[in-house]
Image: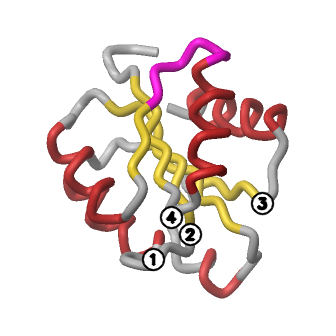
């Protein structure tokens, strides 16, 4: 990776956020966690140019992942994003850019690692 070194995990479910953080840290990535959409916006704006990838929960109480995308891209248009959800909604996913990947929950540590590696290769 270039100077963009951090993966931001955005998930309101503590267990999922912690699992992703531990799994990705063990794979050698620097990982930050935001437990809400607002926290994700604040983190991205404060760390412009340092975030390699955002693992973004599609459904959160304060902000929907789809609603967050344009806000996050406004802060850093080169962000790589993996949307994640327990619900597969092709109608919702049709509204996102081609470069956005989707990771179905529940995911295994192996599937998470593979998705992250693939998303970073695309950058």
Q: Earlier in the sequence, mark 4 or mark 3?
A: 4
Which residue range is magenta in the image?
Answer: 26-31
- x, y percent for residue 7: 46, 33
Return the mark for residue 97: 4
Q: Residue at x 50, y 64 (%)?
A: 97
Q: Is residue 73 left or right of residue 88?
A: left
Instruction: Report crowding for label 1: few under 14, some 14 to 19, many 20 or more residues within 10 A (C-alpha).
Output: some
Residue tagged by mark 1?
A: 64
Instruction: Find the distance from the CA under tag 4 to the CA under tag 3.
Output: 17 Å
Instruction: Find the distance from the CA under tag 2 to the CA under tag 4.
Output: 14 Å
Instruction: Find the distance from the CA under tag 1 to the CA under tag 3.
Output: 16 Å
Return the mark for residue 58: 2
Instruction: Report crowding for label 2: few under 14, some 14 to 19, many 20 or more residues within 10 A (C-alpha).
Output: many
- x, y percent for residue 4: 35, 23
Q: Earlier in the sequence, mark 1 or mark 2?
A: 2
Position of residue 97 relative to residue 64, above or below, is above
Labels 1 & 2 near each other (Cβ < 8 A): yes
Residue tagged by mark 3?
A: 104
């Amino acid at each position: 990776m270039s100077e963009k070194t951090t993966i931001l995990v955005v998930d309101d479910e503590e267990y999922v956020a912690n699992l992703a953080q531990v799994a990705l840290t063990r794979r050698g990535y620097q990982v930050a966690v935001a437990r809400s959409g607002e926290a994700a916006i604040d983190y991205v704006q404060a760390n412009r140019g340092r975030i390699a990838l955002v693992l973004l929960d599609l459904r959160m109480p304060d902000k929907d992942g789809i609603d967050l995308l344009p806000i996050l891209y406004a802060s850093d248009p080169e962000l790589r994003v993996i949307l994640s959800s327990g619900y597969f909604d092709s109608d919702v996913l049709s509204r996102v850019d081609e470069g956005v990947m989707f990771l179905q929950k529940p995911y295994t540590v192996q599937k998470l690692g593979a998705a992250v590696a693939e998303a970073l290769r695309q950058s």
